[in-house]
Structure formats: C-alpha cells, structure tokens
Image (cartoon, grey):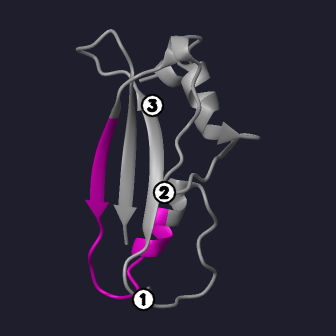
C-alpha cells in the first residue's frame, strides 16, 4: 500500500504531481517518464450515472484534483476527465500506469 511513497515509487508519483497537486492532463497528454522508468499503460473508461444533484461532477473533480464547482449546475452532455494513477500490483514486480477516463 505504501509503494507510491517509497523511493521506488516516488518518481512515478512525481510524474503526476505538480507542486504537490495532481496535474491536469488533456485528453491526448500523459505523464512524462524517463525511458528507464517506462511502464505499460492500462486504460479504463469509468462511466458515472445517477440522479441529478447527487455529486457525480464533484466526485470526478475530487478524483481529478480540481476544485469542485461551488454551486450546482446540471452537466450538459458528457464531460470526459482523464486521470492517471501509478500502481504496483502485488503479483507483479513491475509497476503499471492506470489511465482512467472518467465520463460524467
């Protein structure tokens, strides 16, 4: 569980943080890692559905490291937010980079 804060995981965490805040990546961007630390990327689409006003957009903002909207406004259409998260599966000796496309 503490792999990201270990010396081996710290470079991966630093690639997604800027001034201790999660970097916001565009749809075509990804974290820059040196060639020696290149890892496979596993992509998932996460679709959030639910009643109006329950906090789907606030949850996506919180996970993406951006401020939640101060007032409720209905999301028109679909907003896609890319989110990267490095992890080291227990069954593997090599880390992976999860790319989550959060659809709200």
Indicate whether 8 appears above or below 103: above
Say what secondary structure mark 1 lies in: loop
Which label was assigned to residue 27?
Answer: 2
The residues tagged by marks 2 and 3 sit, at their Cα atoms, a distance apart of 18 Å
Mark with earlier residue (2, 1): 2
The structure residue drawn at horizontal position 49% and vertical position 71%, both measured from the top left corner, is 58
When asked about the image quadrant of residue 46, the answer is: bottom left
The structure residue drawn at horizontal position 48% and vertical position 57%, both measured from the top left corner, is 27
When asked about the image quadrant of residue 88, the answer is: top left
Residue 77, given in percent of the width and then of the height, sits at 37, 85
The structure residue drawn at horizontal position 39% and vertical position 44%, both measured from the top left corner, is 99
Dot 3: within a 10 Å radius of its alpha carbon, few (fewer than 14), some, or many (20 or more) residues?
many
Q: Is residue 92 left or right of residue 5?
A: left
Indicate whether 23 appears above or below 51: above
The residues tagged by marks 3 and 1 sit, at their Cα atoms, a distance apart of 31 Å
The structure residue drawn at horizontal position 37% and vertical position 72%, both measured from the top left corner, is 104
Q: Which residue is mark 1?
A: 76
Q: Farthest left residue? A: 91
Q: Foreground: 38 or 65? A: 38
- Tag nearer the camera, 2 or 3: 2
Q: Which residue is mark 3?
A: 86
Dot 2: within a 10 Å radius of its alpha carbon, few (fewer than 14), some, or many (20 or more) residues?
few
The residues tagged by marks 2 and 1 sit, at their Cα atoms, a distance apart of 19 Å
Looking at the rendering, the stretch of residues picked out in magenta corresponds to: 42-60
């Amino acid at each position: 569980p503490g792999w990201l804060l270990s010396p081996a995981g710290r470079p991966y965490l630093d690639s997604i943080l800027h001034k201790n805040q999660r970097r916001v990546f565009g749809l075509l961007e990804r974290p820059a890692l040196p060639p020696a630390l290149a890892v496979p990327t596993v992509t998932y689409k996460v679709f959030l559905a639910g009643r109006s006003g329950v906090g789907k957009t606030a949850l996506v903002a919180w996970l993406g490291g951006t401020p939640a909207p101060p007032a409720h406004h209905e999301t028109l259409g679909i907003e896609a937010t890319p989110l990267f998260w490095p992890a080291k599966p227990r069954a593997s000796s090599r880390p992976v980079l999860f790319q989550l496309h959060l659809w709200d």
